[in-house]
Image (cartoon, rainbow, N blue to C red):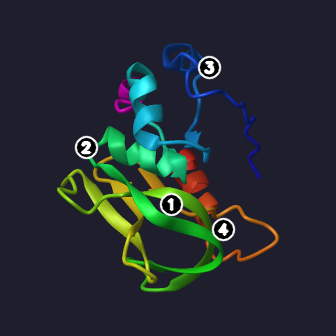
Amino acid sequence: MIVFPILLFPCDYSFKKLCYLNPQGILLSKGPGDPQATFKNNLSNFNLLKNFKKPVFGICLGHQILSLLFGAKTEKMHHGHRGANHPIRNSKTKKVEITVQNHGFVVSKKRFPKTLEVTHYSLFDKTIAGIKVKNKPFFSVQYQPESSPGPQDSRYLFNEFMKLIKNA
């Protein structure tokens, strides 16, 4: 078993300084707030992330930020998705995952960029629930795959992230 040290940085921490630490991967975590405002306030850091060569995994707000970085748009939902037992369909495996969600914004389907691929979508309202950046080891999901106690259908995403790191 390979053990990686995990370091936590705020989104306004200098990406150049972070790169000096030679991270094996970056997790863009969840958080509150408007994804467009967070993205705009930290644009220089996020633009540097675009050229990062190692794996990036985004969760919730991190999913929205990664989507914005590669040309997608986000929009505020009328009610949002809150709570447990949200069915998400994995486009690749066709399996349904039961997830926990807590968000009021979503990646828009309007003018969805060709640089991204939809990997998951909500069975409640067909909103985009996961993306992959084409030609990069970057992916993200709108929901909370780490939630416990609760559904653990999406824990495999962390294994996928570790596999990308090991193969980078």
Point out the residue furthest to the right here.
149
Name the spot of residue 29 as percent of width and height, x first: 60, 44
Q: Amino acid at mark 4?
A: Arg
Chain-order first, disc 1 or disc 2: 2
Image: magenta residue range: 47-52
Q: Separation of disc 1 and disc 4 at Cα?
A: 14 Å
Q: Earlier in the sequence, mark 1 or mark 4?
A: 1
Q: CA distance from mark 1 to mark 2?
A: 17 Å
Which residue appears at 74% of the width and 47% of the height? 2
Image side of residue 35 versus residue 111, left or right: right
Q: Position of residue 76 (x, y in %)?
A: 41, 55
Circle 3/circle 2 CB separation < 8 Å: no
Tag on residue 71?
Answer: 2
Q: Specify which label sits upstream in the sequence, 4 or 3.
A: 3
Circle 4 is placed at which residue position?
Answer: 155
- Pointer 1: what residue? 142
Q: Are marks 1 and 2 in contact (CB under 8 Å)?
A: no
Give whichever of discs 3 and 2 has the lower sequence position: 3
Secondary element type, mark 1: loop
Q: Amino acid at mark 2?
A: Gly
Residue bearing the label numbered 3: 21
Q: Amino acid at mark 1?
A: Gln
- Residue 156 point in image, percent of width and height: 61, 68
